[in-house]
Image (cartoon, rainbow, N blue to C red):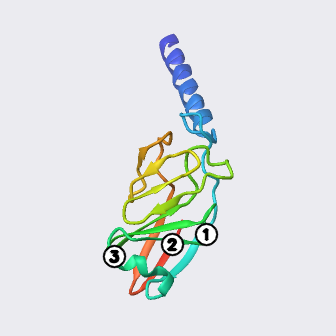
Amino acid sequence: MRFSFVLGLVLLCGVVATLLTGCNSSSNDGQPQIPLAAVNEILFLTDQQNSNLRFDNGAVYHKGGVRGLIIVRQNASSYLAFDRNCPYQPLDTCARLKIDPFLRLYDPCCQSQFSLQGQPQAGPATRPLRQYNAALSGNTLTITN
C-alpha cells in the first residue's frame, strides 16, 4: 500500500514537472522562440517577381510571417516556406534572413547560415528555421500555418 502511494506521488511529480517545462516559452537552449504569426499567403508562380521559383533551389522573398517569408523551390512539385526571422535571438531587430541565391540562407546580424532546407549550417544558431506549409495547385502556391 505504502509503495503504491509513493509510486503514485513520484509519477504525479513527473507529470507536473513535464507540464511546467512544456509551457515555457523558451527552448532548452535558453533562446526565446520566434513569435507566432498567422500565415495565409498566395503566390502565383507565373508572376515575374517569383521567377527564381522556376528553378530548383531558387528562392524569393514574400510578405507574411513575423519578418517576412522566404520561399524555396526544391523541385517542380515541392516548395518550402520559412519565416525570415532568424531563430538565434529572434527578438533582435536585425534578426532577418537573406538569400544567397541558389546556395544558402543567412543572417548578416549574427552570422548564422542555413541550408535551403532550413537547417543550421554555421554560426551560433542551433535551431532550424520556422517552416510553414506550402501547398501547390497548378501555378498557385498557398503558404499557411
Type of amino acid under label 1: Gly
- For the residues bearing labels 1 and 2, Cβ distance under 8 angstroms: yes
Q: Which residue is mark 1?
A: 64
Q: Residue furthest top?
A: 2
Type of amino acid under label 3: Phe
Q: Which residue is mark 3?
A: 55
- For the residues bearing labels 2 and 3, Cβ distance under 8 angstroms: no
Which one is in front in this view, the residue at disc 3 or the one at disc 1? 3
Q: Position of residue 66 (x, y in %)?
A: 63, 61
Which one is in front in this view, the residue at disc 2 or the one at disc 3? 3
Residue 7 vs 65, above or below: the answer is above
**The one of 80 and 21 positioned closer to us in this rendering:** 80
Type of amino acid under label 2: Ile
Residue at position x 41%, y 76% in the image: 52
**The one of 133 and 90 positioned closer to us in this rendering:** 90
Q: CA distance from mark 1 to mark 2?
A: 9 Å
Q: Which residue is mark 2?
A: 143
Which one is in front in this view, the residue at disc 1 or the one at disc 2? 1
Dot 3 falls on a residue whose secondary structure is: loop
**The one of 104 and 141 positioned closer to us in this rendering:** 104
